[in-house]
Amino acid sequence: MKKMLITGGAGFIGSNFVHYTLRERPEYKITVVDKLTYAGNIENLRSAMDEITFIQGDICDRQLMDKLVGEHDIVVHFAAESHNDNSLRNPWPFIETNLVGTASLLEAVRKHDKRFHHISTDEVYGDLPLDRPDLKFTENTPYHPSSPYSSTKAGSDLLVHAWVRSFGIKATLSNCSNNYGPYQHIEKFIPRQITNILSGMKPKLYGNGLQVRDWIYVDDHNSAVHAILDKGQVGELYLIGANGEKTNKFILETILELMGKPKDFYEHVTDRAGHDQRYAIDNEKIVKELGWQPKFEDIRKGLEETISWYKENATLWEAEKQAVEAKYKENGQ
Ligand code: NAD
Ligand code: DAU
């Protein structure tokens, strides 16, 4: 058994990664370390609790990270402050967790000589123009982040690269596009709109809604991370994407149709400051070098399943719905 430490395993992608790994890769013995911020929910791991070890802890706690990293073979690092809108309201938790937290893990990895995989985002590259559909992000695109969130993720990537080059740590990185699926916090675009409709509120579209995101089902992200753990080259960065470019308006209209609402049952609200226009991933490297392929490319079917999941799991989000919406309302969103 390989001992795997998963940071941020009570959040959206982290919890899906835990469930995926238990299902598909039983050779790993899993420990989750998570601070349980507003975005982490122990209930996301309820069905896995008998099979994993859960530790509530902060990745900025250097002593704890030193101990935990020392006790495991491999670290998969998901923990982060992850929401752009929050980073515009208060960047400090992003600076602490995404930069200081990543550095504290890197120092422990260096000391104990362990394998490290850093989970990052395509947002480190900034955005692409809407009128150049021929352009996509590649592993050679220069970093040009727009928000406090994406700049702290870019900084955390640079720390990993520096620790590989200067100290020879055994690390890989992946930068993925927008994930969707179960267990996503209801502050994010797709679950916010689904749960608005389920709560009798109108969905909210920022600006004109013509911004493009490159959607990937969360288990395709998870299988790609495992492909990198299995076959990735130490020191390398891999972009993960599933050719899922859609405008926000298209996603919203599809949700409305699937939930039996009129196409125009939504409100345009204040746009996000510095709003990135388009993300698009060229996934050639991971496909060609590691033989990875996405399996869940039917976004309509994926949205249908995601809607069902939020309907069936209302106990996971109902209690905080009002507070999440109140926070948005303060910004006219
Ligand atoms: P999330 O906000 O749903 O989950 C983050 C988790 O990290 C939560 O469980 C939270 O409690 C935990 N956490 C936060 N600060 C912590 C700290 N100081 N110590 C320990 N735990 C802490 O985020 P997500 O959407 O699941 O994203 C996970 C990772 O994937 C992040 O690194 C993010 O940048 C990256 N990513 C996300 C997407 C996406 O579409 N959601 C796409 C690409 C990359
Ligand atoms: O690209 C990867 C990134 O995707 C990850 O690194 C981030 O952690 C993740 O949150 C996501 O970032 P985005 O900012 O793209 O996701 P978000 O769900 O916040 O918004 C998606 C798009 O929808 C974006 O263009 C803003 C828009 N939006 C969002 C909300 C919450 C709306 O139009 N209305 C909304 O209510």
Image: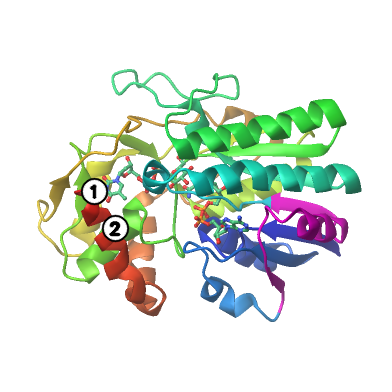
* Image x and y of residue 228, in percent: 71, 42
Which quadrant would residue 9 be assigned to in this image? bottom right
Amino acid carrying label 1: it is: Asn
Q: Are marks 1 and 2 in contact (CB under 8 Å)?
A: yes
Residue on which disc 2 sits? 327
Report which residue position mark 1 lands on.
Answer: 331
Any magenta on residue 59? Answer: yes
Q: Is residue 143 above or below residue 259?
A: above
Check disc 2 and report its element: helix, strand or loop: helix
Query: Is disc 2 surrounded by few (<14), some (14 to 19) or many (20+) residues within 10 Å?
Result: few
Q: Nearer the viewer, residue 172 or 284?
A: 172
Residue drawn at point x = 27 percent, y = 48 percent: 251
User: Is residue 111 left or right of 174 when viewed as pictured?
Assistant: right
Instruction: Give the quadrant of residue 58.
Output: bottom right
Horizontally, is 168 left or right of 185 in the view? right
Q: Is residue 77 visible?
A: yes
Which residue is located at x 37 percent, y 53 percent?
A: 188
Percent x, y of residue 294: 54, 45
- Which segment is the magenta one? 51-76
